[in-house]
Amino acid sequence: MSYRSANAAAYDRLVRSGSAFAKVATDEQCANPLATLDSRGWLPKSVEGLEVLCLAAGGGWQSILYASAGARVTVVDISDEMLALDRREAARRGLAVTAIPLSMDDLSSLEDSRFDIVHQPVSTCYVPDVEPVYSEVARVTKPDGLYISQHKTPTSLQVTHRTPQGQHVLGLEYYRETALPQTEDTSYRETGATEFLHRWDQIVGGLCRAGFVLEDLREPIRAERRAPVGSMGHRGRFVAPYVRLKARRVAMQEKSDGERRLWTP
């Protein structure tokens, strides 16, 4: 089974099991959607009329919030059942949301320079190479467009188990190229999904090489000082599970000799 079909099946099962990943936006969240989406102040004050791509973001949450804020929303995901939640909630709320079944590393059916904002939750761990994702996002994003993404940290994905003393063991090689094996530590891993470790030079450097300028980087805090040993809150004291990136698409212009250079006003 390919990584795409395996991960589509895994997320279909998460929908059927009532997973937290399939919790749709609430009325309270939709009443103030940008505050829900943007606790860091990365988004513009208004997204009214903007073209927004919710990338690998099916599930009836992100797309519904952006649409509630007045954006023109396209959501793509590899899971049909996740996208069904977006369609259902959009219809229920009278919102215009276009839901398309696509893999994040092949957006060939979407036109160039279309989107003002691309917003991607944690998902690049489900593809073997992050470079095609970044390349596709760069292609469909307008010059000066915003790309917000969240990724699992490589260190978190290296953890295989915990010692009797509560120490978290990095048991997987950092330079691993193949899919991750099943491990005793299943924190921040999705059952049945095929996942891959991406290094920092791929996550951050690859973003810059694809034509983005990194404007901010945050590590959401998942540590709980009084959490019992073995809990995710305890694990979060030692290993940051996620990183969030805010990047801007670099505007390019053609030189007379056909080369490309950074645009300057």
Image: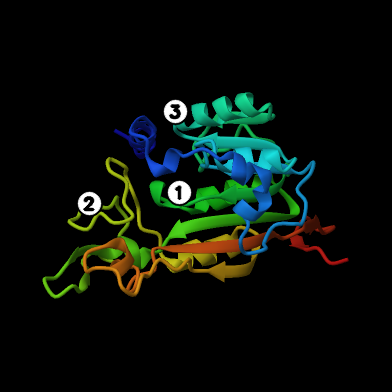
Instruction: Find the distance from the CA under tag 3 to the CA under tag 1.
Output: 16 Å
Q: What is the distance, in whole Å, between disc 2 and disc 3 at their CAs? A: 26 Å
How far from the left and from the top, in percent, is residue 19? 37, 40
Secondary structure under tag 2 reads loop
Residue drawn at (18%, 72%), measured in percent from left and top?
Answer: 166
Q: In this view, does 233 lie to the left or right of 57?
A: left
Residue 28, x across and y down, in percent: 60, 44
Give the secondary structure at mark 3.
helix
**Do we see residue 112 in this rendering?**
no
Numbered disc in front, either 1 or 2: 1
Quadrant where the N terminus sits is top left
Residue farthest along the left direction in this orientation: 164
Q: At which x and y percent is residue 52?
A: 68, 43
Structural distance between the alpha carbons of marks 1 and 2? 17 Å
Residue 88 seen in render: yes
Task: Identify the mark at residue 123; answer none if there is no mark.
Answer: 1
Q: Which of 201 and 155 is in front in this view?
A: 155
Label pair 1/2, CB-CB below 8 angstroms: no
Q: Name the residue under label 2.
A: 181
Front residue (pair 249, 50): 50
